[in-house]
Amino acid sequence: MKFPLSTGIKPDFTKGGGLVAAIAQDAETREVLMLAWMNQEAWECTLKTGEVYYYSRSRKSLWHKGGTSGHVQKLKGVRIDCDSDALVLLIEQIGGAACHEGFRSCFFRELTDEGVTVCCPKVFDPREVYK
């Protein structure tokens, strides 16, 4: 799904040094898959293409999610918080995994009263995908 650039949702990129937090959530199951950052360019590319783009703080560059692995995120909807500095991206995760470590969700560790456990499945071996 592609969205017009004039969606009525206008993230405020001035507050966070040009970045807003973007939470990727499965549009169907509502499972939180990852948190990343978007700048104005990533936001516009996402709306234009219907696939999610982020800004990589470590590489200081635009990042097309799944561009290397093939595990792209198809945009299905967008929610914005009251301060306009955080987004929830409702997405379809292609390939079943959002995490570069091969798990369905980047939030694959859970702290319980018994300690830390793995709470979601590993979908792929990153050594095979990121050769």
Image: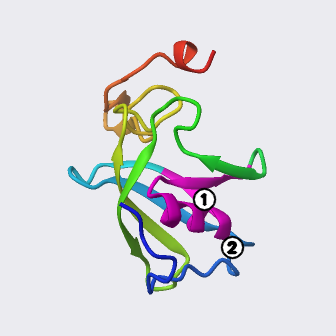
| Residue extending farthest right | 60
From what the image shows, is residue 23 above or below residue 125? below
Q: Is residue 42 magenta?
A: yes
Q: Which residue is mark 1?
A: 37
Q: Which residue is mark 2?
A: 16
Q: Is residue 41 magenta?
A: yes
From what the image shows, is residue 58 above or below residue 14? above
The residue stretch that appears in magenta = 35-57
| Of the image marks 1 and 2, the number of the one nearer the N terminus | 2
Q: How many marks?
A: 2
From what the image shows, is residue 103 above or below residue 11? above
Quick check: 61 left or right of 39?
right
The kind of secondary structure element at disc 1 is: strand
Residue type, numbered disc 2:
Gly
The quadrant in which residue 67 appears is top right
For label 2, count other residues whose C-alpha is less than 10 Å away and answer few (under 14), some (14-19) or many (20+).
few
Which residue is painted at 64% across and 48% down in the image?
63
- Residue 44 in percent (x, y) is at 58, 68
Q: Nearer the viewer, residue 73 or 13?
A: 73
Which residue is painted at 31% across and 32% down in the image?
119
Question: Pointer 1 and pointer 2: residues touching (CB < 8 Å)?
Answer: yes
Residue type, numbered disc 1:
Trp
